[in-house]
Image (tube, grey):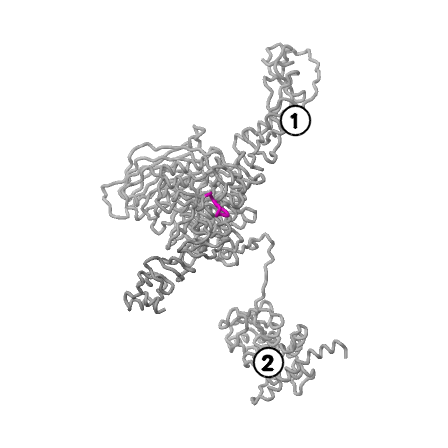
Amino acid sequence: MSESSRSEDVVNQPLKVELSTLMAGMRSSTCALDPIQSNLKQMIHWSVTHTPPQNFKHNPASLPAQQGLSQVIDAGKSQQVGAAAAAASIHLILSAPLASLSSHGTVPLRHGDVNFTGAIQSSRSVVTGQGDVYTNHWAVRITGGPEQADRIAAKYGYMNLGQIGSLEDHYHFHHSRVVRRAAKSFKGPHSFIHMDPQVEWAQQQLVKPRVKRYTKSDPNFIHFNDPKWSNMWYIHCNDNSSRCRSEMNILAAWQRGFTGKNVVVTILDDGIERNHPDLAQNYDHLASYDVNGNDHDPTPRYDSRNENIHGTRCAGEVAAVANNSHCIVGIAYNAHIGGIRMLDGDVTDIVEAKSLGIRPDYIDIYSASWGPKDDGKTVDGPGPLTKQAFEQGIKKGRKGLGSIFVWASGNGGRQGDHCSCDGYTSSIFTISISSTTENGNKPWYLEVCSSIMATTYSSGEFSERKIVTTDLRHRCTDSHTGTSVSAPIVAGIIALALEANLLLTWRDVQHLLVKTSRPVHLRADDWKNNAAGHRVSHLYGFGLVDAGAMVLEATKWRTVPPQHTCTQIHERRTRYIQAGQRLNSSITSSGCSEQAEQHVDYLEHVVVKVLIVHPRRGDLEINLISPSGTKSKLLAKRLFDSSNGGFRNWEFMTVHFWGEKAKGTWTLEIIDTPSKLRNPEVLGNLKEWALILYGTSEHPYQPYRGQHSQSRMLEITNPEEIPEEPELQLEEEEENEYNGPCHSECGEQGCDGPDADHCLNCINFSFGSLKSGRTCVNHCPSGHYEDITSRRCRRCTKGCEKCDGRSASSCLLCRRGLYLNALNSSCIDTCPSGYFADESQRLCLMCHERCMTCLRYADRCTACSEGYSLAGMTCVPECTNGTFFHLEEMTCSPCHSSCRTCTGPGKEECIQCAEGYLQQEWRCVQTCIPGYYSEEAAGVPHKMCHRCEANCLTCSGPGMTCTRCKESYSLVSRTCIVDASCNNADEVFCEMVKSNRLCEKTLYRQFCCRTCLMNG
């Protein structure tokens, strides 16, 4: 016997034993075998002996099944699992109920025939370990036409869904009573269809995994390990669900490489949890301050009601760290994030002004999700100090580029509030941001007004999803809501744009939002196109923000022309506002075209300042109509506003005329619709109003005319286009000799005509050549220098506009677009590393010694020298552990000895503790003081001291683990009870406390000590 046959015989031996045992069991059974079991018995005999059993009814249709059993045996041999697996598979069939046989086979079971497909599939799962998913759909082959298929389907509880494509006699059956997706095939009366004599073939359908062959640029390939990433529906789609929305295009911005790196964002709120695992890496103490506590730690005040969660939630939206296996991914996940704690206390004009003015040269973006009461009756805005802080920020912040203030539009929708009565969101210096639900509907809390610039997703109705973000106490939340959500999202998107172009001004950012935001699927009945072609709504501004479009536009953005302001005041006279009627008042404006510094041709913001006296302010509606016919609602009726204070020099702002022409007649429309009974004799009146137009005299997206002119002048005087030629002596023609006066620039040799180009020699300098024509000039033009010896205008070297000689090192001033390299006095289009281009002087000036590269200013760094790191656009020393960056001294100073990292020199300014220390309420201690216990803390490399339960002097852990009590308390069942008294206040009450599981609460344990503690 060959080796291979010996091997086969050894493998087959156990199989024969198993199958013989099965056959013996069947023979010993007192129950008569039904025809199917009889055939199974014959098949076993055939498989073991390799000879057909007697009286076996042959049917060609059964051959696949016969072959299938051999495959089971072969599989057992090939996978070295032995015959036991195959025998067990056959045993499953023999022991199964009749209805379960061949429930997913490929051969019909008939009397006299055999189907082993079930055994094959069972064995396949044993051998290969594949996890099939069964559906409630079947493919069935039936001859006799659709009517016959319908009858058979109905007979077994199926629905015939029709012919399968173009396959004749093949039908698609569906069974609604079978599980739609299951790990195994469930049996039941429907399984009998496989034994119906009219069914030639039937197969339950399995799910076939298929993958889309996306290229790596597909957004779905961006994935992070943060556990809440899959829930961030407003950033990405992880399925093809129609509920999935990602029109904010944040992935596209990330794919271009923009993640907010080196951009500084600060949250003006109730503080941020600086050591939150999702914020700690991006936390920037230089962008943080506690205005309420007058220190540098913006950590929120913790209380049992978690009142101060707001700032931490907003911060996570902006700059939560990516791929750290915690919580979420921030919109600008590589940005610096700071917090200014200013809402956890009395908010005054000083508090607001101080908060808005903290480090404006360091912080790029301030995000605020707060404002006056959203109660539908308040009219309030920034005080005089805060107004100054706004103005200082946009004039001097970011070294003159302007601080960027992002503001939530308000949550007073249910109270019928209108955000035009909020002076923060209606300021031209802020970017007012609205919200929409995931389905593009108006949220119940949304306030509408004309100052809203753009929109993001946020929460909506109960069934609509909310926003996920960081939460207090190192946690996450999936229930962040309101327009508070939207301002930080836009702050994050602006951070992406600033990374793409650090030189964007505060107005550039607003122009970018206007230009790139899109209406998409946002539902509003007031969408309109203004005369400049911008689609705009009072609910959503210019639409949903588009981060991808914004960063792309930012990379090629050219700074818009200077802002001009044109103010037109209506004549001061009282105009009465009749109840139930409409009052129109008009101003015709030239856009201040007669004054160049105030001339506004193309509009940005339009402000209407009014002085109105009225008995019930909430009954007023105010509209403004532009010369182009666009109408903007400055104020809607407010049902709850019963004030008789009117509007005293209140400013309404609208962005709905953005890009339109300013010149023409502007109409203010005031409608008074009484909502409650009023004294008809008391009328409102418009005492005064002014129209303030903000915009540019040039088209914001076209090159300035001044630059066009300069460019044309340079082309005309381009010396490269006027080749010099050797001087040739020309014979003067005697005929037609000129006898008139010469030009004043002509020399003693006279002239042959009256103009400067007719001179035979020059008093001062000769410019030009024989080919182009020579002319006498007083001074040589740009691109030439004066050769005193020959009295000629000689050409400077290429690119040089002013020089004192022909050599390359003689250049004094370069042509526009080129810069003078001080190292060799040559003109270059790009300054070398370590230098920046000064546009006004057209010079390459040296960057600050700490900057490796810089932009526009010596200390506006874009890369740092060795030993320094970039903080915003400032290079600060790279401080090692044990030191911190001292902002005033601009050096690394030592931390307290107990600190590993810190924000200052004090022992209460530690961020992480030194080895051997524990953190206790922002101090690092060697042992926890009485009343605290030590325990590991998430996201912190050392243990922290946590407070024991109330009245415990010492404890071993959280909850009821007291080991020693404070004075006047006694230890009972590891908790501290007053005065050693452990009694019940009321037995019935205490039984209710215990049955409702309220003994865990300290207060109830005190009242029901005996029931809760003594009785377990």
Residue 117: image quadrant is bottom right
Q: Which segment is the magenta one?
A: 896-905
Vertical arrangement, residue 726 with respect to residue 88, above or below = above
Determine which residue is flagged by label 2. 91
- Residue 340, image x, y percentages: 42, 44
Residue positioned 34% across, 33% down in the render: 570
Residue that sits furthest to the bottom in the current view:
30
Residue 170: image quadrant is bottom right
Q: Depth check: give the residue in front, 905 or 633.
A: 905
Vertical arrangement, residue 102 with respect to residue 685, above or below = below
Give amino acid for label 2: His
Residue that sits furthest to the right in the current view:
1
- Residue 152, image x, y percentages: 53, 76
Q: Depth check: give the residue in front, 567 or 230.
A: 230
Determine which residue is flagged by label 1. 808
The answer to whether residue 536 of the structure is visible from this angle is no
The answer to whether residue 318 of the structure is visible from this angle is yes
Element on which disc 2 rests: helix
Q: Main secondary structure of the magenta part?
A: loop
Q: CA distance from mark 2 to mark 1?
A: 98 Å
- Answer few, some or many: residues within 10 Å of disc 2's Cα (few below 14, many 20 plus, some between 14 and 19): some
Q: Is residue 448 one of those drawn in magenta?
A: no
Give amino acid for label 1: Ala
- Residue 837, image x, y percentages: 57, 33
Q: Quadrant of the N terminus?
A: bottom right
Position of residue 721 in the picture relative to residue 321 (left or right): right
Q: Quadrant of the C terminus?
A: bottom left
Q: Which mark is residue 602?
A: none
Element on which disc 1 rests: helix
Residue positioned 66% across, 16% down in the render: 790
